[in-house]
Structures are given as C-alpha cells and as structure tokens.
Image (spheres, helix red, strand yellow):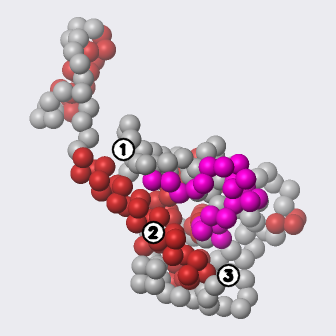
C-alpha cells in the first residue's frame, strides 16, 4: 500500500481488498529506527530502575521524583498519606471495604511492573516465587506509590491521562500506550508513567 496515497485512498483500497475486488498482499513496514529508538528508551528505563536502590536508603523516592531533587523526611510520604493501597481511595487502608484495585494479567500485583518482555527487554523475573508477596523488584516501593499519587494529582508527572475514575484508570494504566509499535511490543501506560517519573530524577540517577 503506497505511503504516498491519501488517507481516503488508503481507506478505499483497504475496502476493495476486504471486499475481494482488489486482492493483493498488503505489507506493513515499520521503520527500523522506531524499533531502535523504543528499545533504547526501554533499556534506559531499566538502567535507571537499577539505580533506584542507591537513592532509596537516603530519600523518599516519590517526593524526590515529584520535586526533581533528593527529598528526605522522617515521617511518611505526604503524597501517599491517607491514600488506600487497596483501592486507591482517600482513606485509611484498615477501614477500606472497597474492592481491590484491579491489576491486569501479566503484571506483578505487588510492584505493578509487566512480567512479559517488551522489545526483548525484561523488567521482572517470571518465576512464581518472585511475584506478589515475594516480589523484590527495584520498583516495588516506587511505581505503585507514584501511580497512586498521580491518580489524585495529574500535575506531579508529565504524562497525559484521560481517566476520570478508578475503573478508567485501571484500564488505562495497564493498556498499551500510543507509543506501542504493533507486532513487536506493546508498551503499557504504567511503564511510560514510570519513565516520566524517572526522567524527573535524572539529576541524581
């Protein structure tokens, strides 16, 4: 299908193909540069994740990402204070009677990282004893809290999110983003949220 054709011409040609009146082989080509660029981004995310532990002992990761500087405080994080880790509502978790926030299949429910490879890049071990309660992923104490905070305050990370309620946020967070390249890797929005948060920590990661 010619890349020079207009959108209307491409649409009509596709209709003819589907109708059987213009039978031909359709080849969809994605520039190698796109793959290379996306893989570099993913590898950079993984590199930054590995360095989180170096910051964690001395600082609050969530506050540090939001303020773009190392933040230390003796009390709990003000951005996750009174946010329920079970349902993401604004209340104390012990009193929560709501359902659990739904983490999609093929994501670790403890750290929220994808358990499948993207462009050949792995972000989480796949053995059963490394998921859930036994998860020791470097993002375990960072991704979920920053995603929880982001739901309530969309200004803390530079990511566009159209969601208005928890149900929409569940679906959006673990769905493939518009940055995905069909046929090679589906990049979930939760990973782009993590990328944006890590980018705000570039001065000390």
Instruction: Give the tally of numbered discs.
Output: 3
Residue name at image x 51 percent, y 83 percent: 67
Q: Is residue 160 left or right of residue 170?
A: left
Marking on residue 181? 1
Whether tag 1 and tag 2 are in contact, CB under 8 A, the answer is no
Measured as percent of width and height from the top left, residue 26 is found at 24, 23
In the rendered image, residue 31 lying in the magenta stretch gets the answer no
In the rendered image, residue 139 lying in the magenta stretch gets the answer yes
Q: Residue furthest left?
A: 4
Measured as percent of width and height from the top left, residue 193 is found at 50, 62
- The residue labelled by disc 3 is 78
- The residue labelled by disc 2 is 47
Magenta span covers which residues?
Answer: 121-141
Measured as percent of width and height from the top left, residue 59 is found at 61, 86
Query: 200 and 139: which one is in front?
Result: 139
Look at the numbered disc 3 and give the secondary structure of its residue. loop
> Residue 91, can we see it?
yes
The local crowd at label 2, few if under 14, some if 14 to 19, many if 20 or more residues have their Cα within 10 Å, is: few
Measured as percent of width and height from the top left, residue 68 is found at 47, 83
Q: Earlier in the sequence, mark 1 or mark 3?
A: 3
Compared with 183, 9 (above or below) is above
In this view, the mark in front (1 or 2): 2
Quadrant location, the N terminus: top left
Instruction: Tell me the distance, in whole angstroms, between the alpha carbons under discs 1 and 3.
Output: 37 Å
Residue name at image x 72 percent, y 69 percent: 83
Look at the numbered disc 1 and give the secondary structure of its residue. loop
């Amino acid at each position: 299908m010619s890349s020079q054709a207009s959108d209307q011409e491409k649409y009509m040609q596709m209709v003819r193909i589907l109708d059987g009146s213009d039978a031909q082989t359709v080849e969809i080509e994605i520039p190698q540069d796109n793959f290379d660029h996306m893989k570099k981004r993913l590898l950079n995310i993984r590199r930054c994740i590995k360095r989180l532990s170096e910051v964690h002992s001395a600082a609050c990761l969530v506050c540090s990402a939001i303020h773009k500087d190392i933040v230390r405080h003796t009390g709990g994080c003000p951005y996750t204070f009174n946010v329920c880790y079970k349902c993401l509502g604004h209340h104390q978790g012990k009193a929560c009677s709501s359902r659990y926030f739904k983490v999609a299949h093929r994501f670790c429910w403890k750290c929220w990282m994808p358990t499948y490879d993207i462009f050949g890049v792995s972000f989480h071990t796949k053995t059963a004893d490394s998921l859930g309660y036994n998860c020791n992923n470097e993002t375990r104490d960072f991704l979920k809290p920053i995603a929880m905070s982001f739901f309530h305050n969309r200004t803390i990370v530079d990511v566009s999110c159209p969601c208005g309620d928890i149900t929409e946020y569940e679906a959006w967070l673990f769905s493939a983003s518009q940055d995905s390249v069909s046929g090679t890797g589906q990049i979930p929005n939760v990973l782009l949220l993590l990328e944006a948060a890590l980018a705000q920590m570039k001065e000390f990661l």
